[in-house]
Amino acid sequence: MPDLRIGIDVGGTNTDAVALDAEGRVVAKAKRPTTPDVTEGLRAALDAVLAELGQGQDRVGRVMLGTTHATNAILERRNLGRVAVLRLGAPATTSVPPLSGWPDDLRAAVSAGEAIVPGGHYVDGREIGPPGLDAVRRFLDAALNAAAADAVAVTSVFSPASGEHERAVEELVKAEYGLPVSVSHEIGSLGLLERENATVLNAALYGVAAHVTEALVTALAERGLGARPYLAQNDGTLMTLEHAARLPVSTIGSGPANSLRGAAYLSGVRDAIVVDVGGTSTDLGVLAGGFPRESAAAVEIGGVLTNFRMPDILAIALGGGTVVRSGGVGPDSVGYRIAGEALVFGGSTATMTDAAVAAGRSPREADGWHERLRTAVEAGDVPESTLKRAVAVADEMVIDAVDRMALGRTDRPLVAVGGGAFLLPDDIPGASRVVRPEHAEVANAVGAAIALASGRVDTILPTGDSRTDAIERAKEEAAARAVAAGADPSGVEIVDLIEVPLSYLSEPAVRIHVKAAGPLAR
């Protein structure tokens, strides 16, 4: 019976994998270095877990992957598709054209042309004017003649209030041009430019999503696994591969979200500060009711401001592989090369792992670490005083970061996870206590394995007699999106409902945010 599930999370230094049984217990786990081609590290971690399962691998029914493919593609400007960018909002929005403020190299890699055509809605959902479908055709004819476009991104003014015009253009493009279309009302919230940016990035990532999907499906097939694959989203939930193919931008930030969900699951704590210490960086986030606290501010990705959902994460340049020098700590790191370069592994580079071991904070599996470090110190590779000073500097960095995330609250525990969690002291100001759960080193992979599927709606509704009916429709749409992402229809619940009254409108209105989540369909 397929009662096992495997969670895999690709980090900057390591790729972690775990297998959980039907009761949610960790029955196998592995940590392998992330490779330059992250797919190879994924396969190595998967193989290690399957080897530990042995004959039990026939019981694997689901595989969940949290990946950095999309993030890396944007940061490195590689493997991105060419996008024809359409905005429905002429003439009101022409003063700030699409892709304003984008880095020149990213814009050159992505844009296949931009245009602003008539269309859009007012904030209360009334139509500004009919969509300029003829102008859309003229732009696409010219853009496709001038440059090859792989996809089209469509953003309409106030589309969270009404996505009608975006859907009309989507139907036209698919019927007449056969190109995939990214529509903004499915991706971002209020804020035209940020929503447009997120929509364009989403369209540019279609090819990356196809590569990830193919790699995962192929890896499972090569190993004879009939498991159903899923990808992790950046709100700590999952989606099917079909859903990910349409919304690949949702995978950005999935790693920190997985760590937060895994920390909640392993520790049993639903409200806490989570500190995930990796090899390159330390990510801090906040758990609220067992889910990541979401960022209320625009999020910058690769130099571009976006407003799609992202966990509220503070990253600092501190990890197990962070290089230690007489002048300070980092910000550079040996990353996935730590097993060959750190002093405790017989290498020649002093790292924060070495400093933590010198301070007596080594993990349980630190066989031979102290001896090798002592040999390096006696050989003059690094002064012991430098290692002690590095620990003090690192502790201050963590204390400051915790203070920034706590927002004045000091009654929450701190859950320490990640392969470098042993770097953290046992007492941290700003937290009531430090919790170190079992299997903390693979919390991100656990978070991927236990995640639910979700859907959400962020829209604007009039506050008249129809308000109750409109809210119910928003709930139904959020539930439908959760089912489309892979949730069991019978288990979907509304887990978040926020109403924000909007002022200074001719007609009273309210902004509604609804999130639905449920267990995966069998």
Image (cartoon, rainbow, N blue to C red):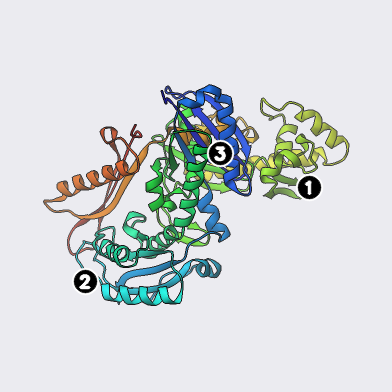
- Residue type at mark 3? Asp
Q: Is residue 1 left or right of residue 371?
A: left
Label 3 belongs to which residue? 276
Q: Does residue 417 appear in this view?
A: no
Dot 1 alpha-carbon crowd within 10 angstroms: few under 14, some 14 to 19, many 20 or more: few
Instruction: Provide residue 120's location: percent of width, then percent of height.
Output: 26, 68
**Quick check: 193 above or below 509?**
below
- Residue type at mark 2? Pro
Instruction: Provide residue 404's location: percent of width, then percent of height.
Output: 52, 46
Q: Earlier in the sequence, mark 1 or mark 3?
A: 3
User: Could you say which is closer to the camera, residue 169 or residue 309?
Assistant: 169
Q: Quadrant of the N terminus?
A: top left
User: Could you say which is closer to the camera, residue 370 or residue 255?
Assistant: 255
Label 1 belongs to which residue? 326
* Residue ID at (27%, 75%): 134
Q: Earlier in the sequence, mark 3 or mark 2?
A: 2
- Label pair 1/3, CB-CB below 8 angstroms: no
- Residue type at mark 1? Ser
Q: Quadrant of the C terminus?
A: top left
**Quick check: 82 above or below 264?**
below
Label 2 belongs to which residue? 130
Spatial CA span between label 1 and label 2:
66 Å
Q: Secondary structure at mark 1?
A: loop
Q: Secondary structure at mark 2?
A: loop
**Quick check: 149 above or below 450?**
below
Instruction: Provide residue 239's location: percent of width, then percent of height.
Output: 39, 43
Q: Does residue 212 appear in this view?
A: yes
Q: Is residue 420 left or right of residue 341?
A: left
